[in-house]
Amino acid sequence: MCLMSHISYLMSHFVVDEKASSEWSWRTHYTEACKRFKVVPVSYVVQHLQEDHLSLAHRGLGPQGAKALAVALATNTSILSLNLQDNGLEGTGGAAVADVLKENCHITEVNMSDNRLGDGGCQAVSSMLKENNSVLHLDLSGNRLGDRAADHLSPALLRNATLRRLDLSHNALGEPAGLTLGDALSENTGLQWLSLAWNSIRGRGAAVLANGLGGNFFLRSVDLSYNGFGKEGARALGKALKDNNVLEELNASNNRIPPEGAVYLACGLKVNKTLRCLNLGRNPIQSVGCYRILKSIQENPDPAVEELNFYDIAVNQEFEDLFKTVRDTHPALTVHHGGKIGMFGNTQV
């Protein structure tokens, strides 16, 4: 019997008297569902079903516990935020939660991080996103999602225009994922914040993903840190900064970007009018790359950049002299770097 059939069965057999409070009804549905799925009821769930935020992080629900919880959520109208981080939901438990979110139109924030959802669980979540118009924030980080997961997510991102924040960090998305997600992002009209940090997006996938960002006019903040964009990915990001005048924050730290890649980024920054914060820390761009980035700010007639992050990258005196000059015309600009060559420690100037 599928989960929604279980829910229908339980609600038809265990609904309390119409005069009973909705709180009592939800508690009844949950405890009876726990009996049916052979799990021990979580007292915290029973006690907090009428609150707007239900935090169940690290409580070991497991797949069966998630199914029981889904019964309680099916008719719940109080909970707006649901935190299920690190509960061992796996694919079946994730699917149970995803299925009930097709019915519940009140929950707007969902954290399903660190649950070993895998590609199967991601497929269920993607199916939910095609129908759900309520979830605004979704955290799927740390779920062992691979390239097949991206194949499921991409059509969902093309159809869903409601989701505002999506966290896909700390997964196993590789070059193929960059290809499919890049095409989807270029057409998405809802996302404003996206994290793809700590994946393995590189090569042509990185370039296509960057191209997709260039064609997206809704995203405000993007985290691409700890991938492998390299020179070609940086070239595509530089072009994206030329084309995109909506993005305000970009984190491309730890991406093996060489000095030549910094030159490409500088070309984009020279004309970009919206980017406020750029993080290129821990890339091998060297002092010359930092210099070219800073020089592009100076040459931009209408720059928006307020913060440049070059953490762990040592700079030379030529960079320091340029920064003093730029500060005369852009006094609000803050630069973080790894100190002057021959010195140690990160420095903020």
Image (cartoon, rainbow, N blue to C red):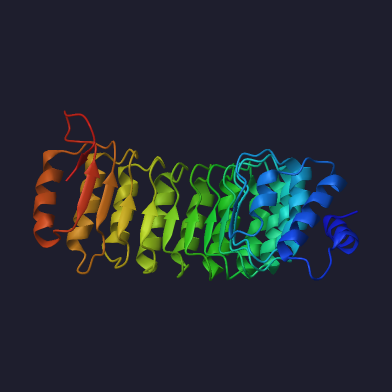
Q: Closer to the camera, 205 or 155?
A: 155
**Above-or-below relation of 121 to 296:** above
**Above-or-below relation of 192 to 67:** below
Quadrant location of residue 348? top left
Q: How many badges with numbers are in the image?
A: 0
Task: Tell me if residue 251 can be seen.
Answer: yes
Q: Is residue 85 left or right of residue 9?
A: left
Task: Tell me if residue 102 can be seen.
Answer: no
Q: Is residue 211 left or right of residue 252?
A: right
Q: Closer to the camera, 308 or 77?
A: 77
Residue at (67% x, 68% y) in the render: 105
Residue at (47% x, 67% y) in the render: 215
Quadrant location of residue 320? top left
x and y percentages locating residue 270 in the rendered image: 26, 62
Q: Closer to the camera, 208 or 279?
A: 279
**Above-or-below relation of 148 to 102:** above
Quadrant location of residue 316? top left
x and y percentages locating residue 347 in the rendered image: 20, 39
Q: Closer to the camera, 151 or 47?
A: 47
Q: Is residue 68 left or right of residue 86?
A: right
x and y percentages locating residue 289 in the rendered image: 26, 45
Q: Is residue 283 left or right of residue 305?
A: right
x and y percentages locating residue 147 in the rendered image: 64, 47
